[in-house]
Structures are given as structure tokens and as C-alpha cells.
Amino acid sequence: MEHTFDIKAAFAADALSAKLAPVAASERIQALDVVRGFALIGIFFMNIEYFNRSFLDFGTGIPPAAHGIDWLATYFVNYFVAGKFWTIFSLLFGMGFAVMLSRAEETNRPFIKPYIRRIIALAIFGFLHNVMLWYGDILLSYAFTAGGLLIVLFGRWKWIVLSVVGLLGFCFIPGMNSFGAVVAGIAYMGLLGLFIRNEKLVKVFGKQIPLFSVLFLVAGVLVGLVALVSWFVVAMKNGRNPMSVMAFVFLLIAFLSARFHQPTTARFWRAGVLIYCMPFLIGTVFGIISYQQPIKSVFNSPEAVQLAAEKAKIKAEEELSKKAAIAEGKLAPKVNAKTDAKVEAKKGDPKVVKTDAQKKIETDADSINNIQENRKKIAEDVEVLSHGTYMDTVKQRFDRLMEGPFNPAGMAFEAIALFLLGLWFVRAKIITKSSEHLALFRQIAVIGLPVGWGLSVLASSIAVSHVPGVSGDGWQLSQMLLNLGNLPTCLAYLSIVVLMLHSDTVFSKIKVLAPFGRMALTNYLMQSLVQASFFYGWGMGYFGLGRAQQLGFAVCVICLQVLFSHWWLARFRYGPLEWVWRAVTYWQFPVMRIKPDSLQAQIG
């Protein structure tokens, strides 16, 4: 990109402008590792639930069967843990990126190639974790996000455009629909890079406006004109609300990006907060509208239920026909004549304009079939996980992943916001010199905790569970408010941990989590191995353990892992998988053992 500020120069400038005395490496790393260890605890509390139920059941809230202490345990995790700790973990990945970049500059070492190797290794860890142990892996998504961060900070606009155009065709290959998340992600990261790095100004109505803002201004005006036309053209009425909202969002981004374009050092956190909060703010508006509607279920429509049954029957006949053809060694017909007639009958004459009621019935019928298909998959998951062999579970997870192999890239659209915030925390020296910013951490904790918890409690007062196919129950509004509360709560938790670390009281003992956090990759994957071995049918078979007992189990494992981490790092410089990750990153075998006479603290 032309007219950009130099990322490396910005880091160097920050270092030169800092007048405070350098902080010891052990203190800087300790603050990060303690927070990382704390985040691992919350991650365990979150993940353990879905070692005891199908991951396809994710997003439905507290199970109806939960009562008493299990209900309270689920409520505690859902509203004070879940969503708060993966955000901390994401912040830490952004911080790790910035620390690695600054160290590369200080030692005059290359950065891009080692970091690409680091991303590839993380993706391999994530893929193996996903297939061999647990479908809820987050490492693969982080690998995609880390690649996106490279585009944001170092990508050249010409190559970004060429990549999007060149890769777009892959989305049309059968079975590659999910690749669209990668293509869209490249474009998305390119736009973020344009905001963060481009300094070019364009004169609009006599005012100098950033190029990024001009692009969104033009897009907002064009979409706004289409939205305006849609209010006068009946055939376009279904696009009225979406187009109107899109135009408003584009114009709002244009205004905010122009208004808050300077200073350059603040763009990271401003971009992060905006792209994290905006989808949930928009969702909150629609959630409020939906909450005003009466509660209803797609299953309450006899016409939709009947149509869904007919469509399901036709689909079953097609699948049987395909299986029979494959068994005979023939090419599977797309559909036989009889079925073709039925399909056309259900689709109706394309020249006939369907009424809104007919469209609603068809939409509800499709929703019914999707819900029933998902229920079937959930039942299959539970059966395999609770009674299947290890290879049965591997095959199941691999098949699920191959249904959308690039779906993990979709999480990058949200995680990049937290990566950018983490990057800013390091660039501004807030986390690396945490002892000098305790007043800021106090402010974040005092404001963030009541705001975050308040939004969480408000969300839980609206709805704590959801039945698929039901609308008007407030679930959408509840989830949007909960997600909005995750960010301030996450920052408050991080701040509280830092304040405890620097406390002169017993709270400073939280530093005991530092070795646990230094071995975060090893401990994260070890948690999955322990849980899979304990809960799944091929292991000890405790699948379906009560929620309160799950948390008790998690606490016991975490205590053992903390002890193990202390024992291991008293003898070795890195955790086992951290050593592998570092070896791949720097393409050399680092020294593993600590010499007995060495008095220097070894830092990962």
C-alpha cells in the first residue's frame, strides 16, 4: 500500500520515546504468563461441557434437564466464564505476535518467515487436535486469524486484490463452499490494513478524508440508493431492511474512521473495539425488534410440517437412489423422473409469484428439516462419543470437519478484533510494563466488571435457553447483550489478574499460575487428552457427567497441571509442545534441559 506508516518504524519509535527504565524480561513475561494461565482455567471450565454433550448442541443455552446445583454451575459458566476467557486467550495471541515482532527488531532477526512457520505449525496442531481429540478446537481458527494479522500489518494491496480474484473460483468447486470464508477473510483483512496503515487523504467537498473512509462513504451512498429504490419496487421488498441497515453501517464506518483516524497508534484498539462491538450492537437492535413479536415455533404450522415431511421424503428417495447406483458401480442419477416431478411440484412454477405466506411456509419447512437433521446428528454424536471406539470418534470428527474444512476461518472475523487489541496492549507498553500502568488497570477493572457483569445478568434475565425453531423468545437479544458484555468483562478480568500480581497481599500468590501459562499449548492439549480419555466411551466412559461434577473434575486436573508445570519447568526450558513449536518457528532445535548450576530464569 502506498502512503503507509511503517509498522517496524512505529515499534522502534515507541521504544525510543520510552523514557522509563527498561523492565526486566522476567517481569514482562510473568505478567503475560500469569494471565495466560488464568485464561486456561476458564477455557477448561468452558470446554468440559462439550466433552459431555454434542458440540452441535452449542448455542442453545442451559439444558432443560439441568436442575439444582448443575443448573447453578451451568449458569455460572455461561454468564461469567464462557465468552470471557476465549477473548482473553485471543488478546494474548495478539500480544504474543507483538512481542515476537519487537524481539525480532531488537535482535535484527527476520520475522515474516519464522512467523509463517509458526502459523503453519499452529494449524497442524489445531487440525490434529480437532480430528484426534475434540471438535471444539480453537487453534486452527487462531492460525487463520494470525495469517490475517500478517495481511493487516504487511499485506500489499495489489496482491490482496489479486489473491481475492484468483481464489474466488475455488469457492465454486463441489465441497469447497467453506473456502469462501478464506476469500472473504483476505478481503476483510485487507480493508483493515487499509484503515490502519494507509495515510492517503482524498479531498471530498473541500475536506481531506482518509481513503478508507471515502471507500465506505461511496459504498454507503450506493447501497443507500438501492435501499431507497427497494421501498418503491415490490419485487425488492425482501431486501429493504438488510440494504437499509447495510447502508447505515457503511456510512457509520465512514464517519467513525474519518473522525478517529488519528493518532496512528490508537488505530489498533479503535479498530478492534469497533469490529468486535458493531455486529452485536446491530444484532441487539434486531433482537429488540424480534423480542416484541409473539413467541411462535415453526413446528406450530401444520402446512410447514407437512411440506417439510414431503421434502424429507423426496430427499431420502434421492439418497437411496444414489446409494443403489453407487453399489451397482454406476453414476448416481441426479434425480429420477418421478422424483423430478415431485421436486418441481414443490418448487412450483417459477413464473408464478408466491405470496408472503407461501414463502414463509417454505422457509419454515426448510428450518424444520434443518433442525431435525441437526437433532439426528446430535443423537449420532452422543452414541459415538459415549459408546464408540476411538477410531469411530476420529472418523466422526474428520467427516464433520470435511463438511466445511475452512469453516474455522470464519472465526477470524471476530478474533482479529481481539488480536488487534492485544497488539496495542504491547505496543503501548501497557502489559509489558504493567507495574507502571496499575492506575489504568484499576480503571478498566472498576468500569469493565460492572458493565460486563451487568450486561450478562441482563441477558440472563431475558432468556437462559433456547429451543431451535422458536422465535420471539428473546434469545437473540439475550445473546447479543451477552456478547457485548464479554469484552469489558474480559478486560476487567485481565486487569484484576495484573493488579493481583503486583499486590503486596496474599493475592500476589496468583503468580503460581506463571509456569502453567508458560506451558499453555501443552496444557491446553493435555486437557483435551485427559477429558477425552475420561469421558468418552473408548476411555473410562463417564460421558454425560453432571455439570457441577464437571467443574470439580476440572479443578482437580488444573491443580495437577499447575504442579506438573512447576516440576517440568524446574528441569526444562520449555513445555514439550512449546519446544516443538519453537523449533519449527526458528527452524533449529533449542536447548531443552536446564543446567543444574544455572541460576538464570528460563523464559519461554
Image (cartoon, helix red, strand yellow):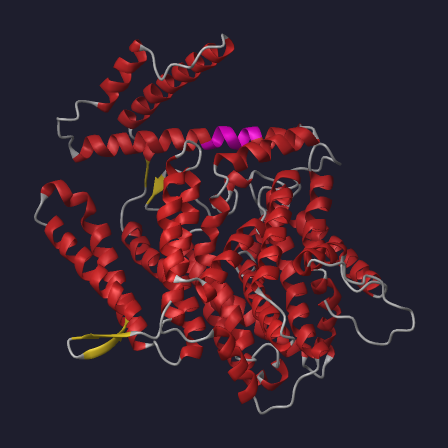
Please check the rendered image and state whether residue 519 is part of the magenta-colored stretch, yes or no.
Answer: no
Residue 361: percent from left, percent from top: 25, 30
Characterize the magenta stretch by its predominant secondary structure.
helix
Observer-nearest of 146 and 341? 146
Asked if residue 151 lies left or right of residue 568, the reply is left
Residue 340: percent from left, percent from top: 29, 15
Locate the N terminus by quadrant: bottom left
Residue farthest to the top? Answer: 328
Residue 501: percent from left, percent from top: 68, 77
Q: Residue at x 65, y 50 (%)?
A: 548
Residue farthest to the right? Answer: 597
Q: Which residues are magenta?
A: 374-380
Residue farthest to the left? Answer: 232
Observer-nearest of 484 and 226? 226
- In this rendering, the answer to whether 446 lies above or below 488 is below
Observer-nearest of 284 and 403? 403
Q: Residue at x 92, y 73 (%)?
A: 597
The answer, for residue 60, to whether it is visible in the render is: no
Q: Residue at x 58, y 53 (%)?
A: 72
The answer, for residue 318, to whether it is visible in the render is: yes
- In this rendering, the answer to whether 532 lies above or below 413 is above
Locate the C terminus by quadrant: bottom right
Observer-nearest of 214 and 231? 214
Please check the rendered image and state whether residue 376 is part of the magenta-colored stretch, yes or no.
Answer: yes
Residue 356: percent from left, percent from top: 18, 35
